[in-house]
Amino acid sequence: MSEKDEKSMRREGDIPGEIGPYGTEFHDEITGMEFVWVPGGSFEMGDTFKDGEARELPVHPVTLEGFYLGKYAVTQGEWLKIMDKNPSEFQQGERYPVEDMNWNVVQQFLEKLNAASGRQYRLPSEAQWEYAAREGGRKVRFGTGKDTIGPDEANFNGREQNVESYSRIGADREETIPVESFSPNTTGLYQMSGNIDEWCQDIWHNDYTGAPADGSAWETEGADSLRVVRGGCWYGFPRWVRATSRDWAGAGNRSGILGFRLSLPVHQQ
């Protein structure tokens, strides 16, 4: 696919200059969480580089409405404005991502946040997550907007024995770092590759056969006790922090590598 065709596919159906009801960015009044507008469009979802796994196939077209996505993963400070206890393994400051909570507890957080805010925040769908990580569906390997990566621009396991043709050797920090570390991608989103794996709304399926084409969360069939996680983490190898890499965790499982960021679909306004 040519760059021109790719651009046309990504922007099909977009209204030029369209932004969400709260502008290009807004703050949640209750928690202070920051959100970025992700314009709608179409893209080819999945392993377009052909260096991933069967679970990232088949590559398939998806068309999404515009939506808001958290600029950062939800932090420990933001979590504590809604919940009574900080579950995190790495409690080094309020701007560190909250982690070590399971998918089910995230739903409790959402119920309380939505009741307090009057909005309908939710976990992003897997398609929303990948589309945003790839800067509106561009063919880029990482959530940084680049095709190569190093520990100088993302938090992952950069030891020599884990290096790939698209990665650089560097630090293995063995812990989380503040959410605003490094630079955002061109959509304005931070750490879509590395630091923590992020829960999505979707039930886990072994591949994309039968996946929704409208960007909605895939919550039928599959293993409903398992949920999708995306992004890779501080513990992850370079191949795990690719924008198309996908994995699962039990909805009741908790770990110091698991966190989340929130979305706000416009159609729920």
Image (cartoon, rainbow, N blue to C red):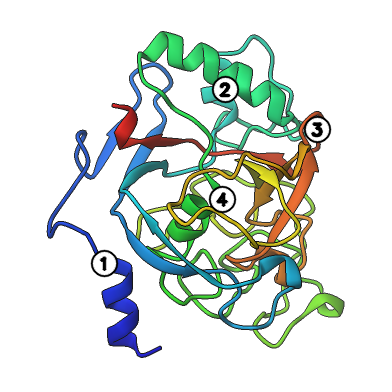
Residue matched to label 4: 126
Calculate the distance from the C-alpha at mark 4 to the C-alpha at mark 1: 19 Å
122 and 167: which one is in front?
Answer: 122
Residue drawn at point x = 65 percent, y = 68 percent: 151
Who comes first in sequence, dot 4 or dot 2? 2
Calculate the distance from the C-alpha at mark 4 to the C-alpha at mark 2: 22 Å
Residue drawn at point x = 37 percent, y = 36 percent: 265
Disc sitting over residue 11 in the figure: 1
The amino acid type of the residue labelled 2 equals Trp
**Residue 264 sits in which quadrant?**
top left
Disc sitting over residue 79 in the figure: 2
Q: Secondary structure at mark 4?
A: helix
The amino acid type of the residue labelled 1 equals Arg
Q: Residue furthest left?
A: 16
Q: Is residue 110 left or right of residue 172?
A: left
Residue matched to label 3: 254
Q: Is residue 264 above or below residue 78?
A: below
**Residue 46 sits in which quadrant?**
bottom right
Q: Position of residue 148 (x, y in %)?
A: 57, 80
The amino acid type of the residue labelled 4 equals Glu
190 and 6: which one is in front?
Answer: 6
247 and 35: which one is in front?
Answer: 247
Q: Secondary structure at mark 1?
A: helix
Quadrant in the picture for the N terminus: bottom left
Mark 4 neighbour class, 10 Å CA radius: few under 14, some 14 to 19, many 20 or more: many
